[in-house]
Amino acid sequence: MKETELRLLLREMSLEEKIGQLVQLPGYFQHEGAATGPAGDMGLTQEDLRLAGSYLSIIGAEKIRKLQTEFMAQHPHHIPLLFMADIINGYRTVFPIPLAQGCTFDTEAVQEGAAIAAREAAAAGIHVTFSPMADLVRDARWGRVMESTGEDPYLNGQMAAAMVRGYQGDNPKKKGKIAACLKHFAGYGAPEGGRDYNNVELSPRTLLEDHLPAYQEAVDAGCEVVMASFNTLDRVPSAANEWLFREVLRKKMGFSGMVISDWNALQELLAHGIAADQREAAFIALRAGVDMDMTSPIYTRNLKQLVEEGRVPEAWIDESAWRVLTLKNKLGLFERPFKDADEEDEKALLLSDAHRQAARDCAEKSFVLLKNEEQMLPLQGDEAAFIGPYVGSPYLNGAWSIFADDQDTVTVKAALSRHPKTKKAPTAPGCPINDPDQPVMGFQQPVAQDNLEPETALNEAVSIAKSAQKVVLCLGEHRECTGEAASRGDLTLPKCQLRLLEAVAAVNENIIVVLFGGRPMDIRPLKEKAKAILAAWLPGTEGGNAVVRTLLGESNPSGRLSMCFPYCVGQVPIHYNHLNTGRPYHGDCHAGRFGSKYQDIPNEPLYPFGFGLSYTAFSYSPVRLSADRMTKQGSLTASVTITNTGTCPGTETVQLYLRDLAASVARPVRMLKGFRKVALAPGESREVSFTVTEDMLRFYDLSMRYVSEPGDFEIFLGPDSQTQNKARFTLE
Ligand code: NOJ
C-alpha cells in the first residue's frame, strides 16, 4: 500500500480501532500457543478481540490462514493481524542456542541460521520473531545467558546484526523473510544477583559503552521492532522509560520502527510501584513510547478513557498506530495478508535435509574444546564407552525451542548407532540429568524425571567403563535450567552426575567429557578428572550427529568461548574486559594482602573469553604494525602470521584486542575490536591483517563526549582474551 493510502486508512479508523492496533493478544485466546508468562485474566470483551492488532505464539500455515481470514472479514477496515512468535534459535530445525552461536565467531553461519529459521517460520505463517536478544551478559547465574551471544559488546553486535540480516534479508516483505524484534531494551542482561526480572543498576557510561553498542548494530542493520525490557534501569522500568525510548532509542540511535512491551510488562508497572492503577500505567507506557502492549489489558481497557478525558492526546495513539500499520505494510500484509503461510512449503521446508545440514554445521562450529590432554580426542572409533544422562537425551534444544518436537532431535545415542565406527559402542545413562530431590519447572509443567533406579544405573555404567579404553561422559544441565526464569545460585553440576563422574573415574582414567547446557558452569571437578572436555552447549536438532562427528575428528573444533567459564560462582559477574583497579593483581604478590583479589579463589576464570582448542595447533608470529604512530584521520595495519603447526587441517580464530593505556576515565584492560577465522592445512601459514582506525579508540570521556584521546595504546593479536602477543602505538 502506498504511504498516502495508509495515511488515509489511519484517518478513517475509529479511536477504538486505532487502540486495537496497539494490542497483542496471547495465542491462548484462540486456544493456541504456549503462554510464555503468567496467564492472567485480561478481562477483554469480544469487541476487544475483534479489533486486536496482533497475536503472539500462534503458528502453523493452516491455522494462521484460517484465523486471518475470519479476523479480517469481521474487522471494520479488514486490517490483517500481525503474527509474532519466539523463533529464537530455529523453528522446527533447531540450531544451537544463541550463546553457542556466539562461540562460532562466524557471522555467516549465524546469518544462515537466522535465514533458515525465517524461511521455516514464514512458511508457518509468522511475520515477526522476538529475536535477536542482544543483551550483554556477565553473570552465568542468569538463566537467559543462553539466549545471548555472550559477554562482549563487539561480538554481540556482530551477531545481532547477522541475525537481523538473516531474518529480514534486504526486505522483510520478500518470500521467506520475517521482521526481527531486538530485545530487551535495555540492560536486561545485568539483573542484580543474576536473578531474572531483577533490577539493573548501570552507570550511564557502562550503559552507553558496554550495553548499547550491540543494540545499535541491530538497529543499524535495519531491525524493524524493539522490545522494552522488564527491568528497571536507574529505578525506572523500561516500559515507563521515556528517556530510554524517545531520547536514546529514537533520537540517539536512530530507530524508527515499532516498540513492543514484554509480556504483561505494562500491568507489571503496578508491581514496580510506578503506576498506582491501570489507567496510570497506560498513560506512562504510551508516553514512554511503547507502541504495542504485549498481552496485558492495560491499553485496551484504558486508552480510550484517557483520550476522552483529554489526558492522552489522540496524536499519541495515532503515532503508535501508524508504526504498527507501517510495519504491516512493510511486510506487505495489506496485499498478502497470509504472507508466506503455505502448507506445501511447510512440508518441503521444515526439517529439510539442507536445513538439518546447516544446523549440524553450525553446531559443530559452536563446540569449544576446553581441554585435550594425551590426545584423548579425536577418537579412533570403537575404543570408547559412552556414559551419562545426555547420551540418550533428546533435550538438546534450548528452553526457547517451544515449537520444536524433541522427537526430531538426533540424540548422541542415535548418532552413535548410525555411524559405522561407533555403532557397537556400549552406552549407559548412569544417572538422571536432574537430581531427584531438585525438581525443575518447565514452561508449563515440572520436568519429568528419568525413571532410573540409581544404584543399578550407576553399577551398569561403572561396569562398562571398566572394560573400555576410554569413556566419553555426556553430562550437563537440563535445558530447562536455563532460559527465562531459570536463574541459579549454584553453578555446579547435579550431585548425581558428580557422583557418576567419581565412580567412573575410579575405574577408568581416560575420561572425555562432553558438556551440555545453556550456561558456563563451575566445572572444576571435570577439569580435574577428565583428560578432555568438549563444551557442546545445547546443540539443537542435529546435536547428536555433530557431537559424534566431532569426537571422531570428522569435524575439528573451532569454537571459542563467547562467555568465560568462571572458576566458581563466587566470581560472577565476571568478564574479561574489566577495569584494572588501582591495585591490579597478577598473581605475583602472594605475600601481600592488599591486592585486588580473593583470599580463597583466583581472579581468573577457569576458561577465559575467546578460548578454545583445536585438534591441531597454531603458532603466532609477533604482532607487526605498519607504523607506531597514527593520526586521528589516519589508520594503521596490525598483522600477524599464523601457522598450523599440527597434523590436521583446522580453523583458527584470530582475535584483535585494544587497550587504551591512559585516558580521562578508566578504560578496560582490553576490548575485542575484530576477529577473523582462518582455515589452514597442516604446515600452512597465512598473514592476517586488521586495519585500526580512530573510531575503534573512542569512548565516553569525562564529559560524556564520544571521542578518542591522544596517547599510547596496546594492540593484541592472539587466540584468546589472555594473549600477551602485543605491540604498542601512539595516537597523535
Ligand atoms: C517474555 C520474554 O522476556 C521475551 O523475551 C519473549 O519474547 C516474550 N516473553 C514473548 O514470549
Image (spheres, rainbow, N blue to C red):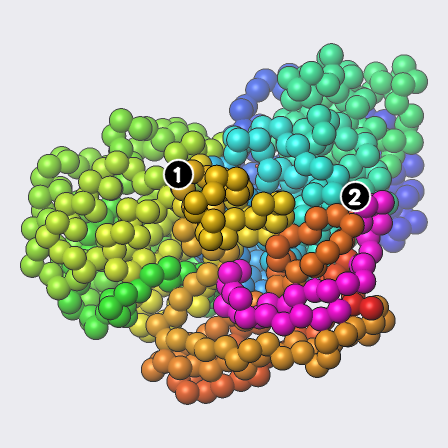
220 vs 41, nearest the viewer? 220
At horizontal 52% and vertical 34% (from top left) the residue drawn is: 194
Q: Amino acid at mark 1?
A: Asp
Residue bearing the label numbered 2:
249
Residue 128 in view (yes/no): no
Which quadrant of the view contains residue 303? Answer: top right
Describe residue 446's horizontal placement relative to residue 126 as left or right: left
Secondary structure beneath dot 1 equals loop
Q: Position of residue 647 (x, y in %)?
A: 34, 82
At horizontal 24% and vertical 41% (from top left) the residue drawn is: 498
Report the residue that reaches farthest toward the front: 591
Q: Is residue 728 magenta?
A: yes
Describe residue 631's horizontal placement relative to residue 604 as left or right: right
Numbered circle sitting on residue 600: 1
Boundaries of the magenta span: 701-730
Indicate if the residue with disc 2 has its beta carbon within 8 Å of ligand 1.
Answer: no
Numbered circle sitting on residue 709: none
Mark 1 burial class by Cα count in 10 Å: few <14, some 14-19, many 20+: few
Describe residue 528's horizontal placement relative to residue 38 as left or right: left
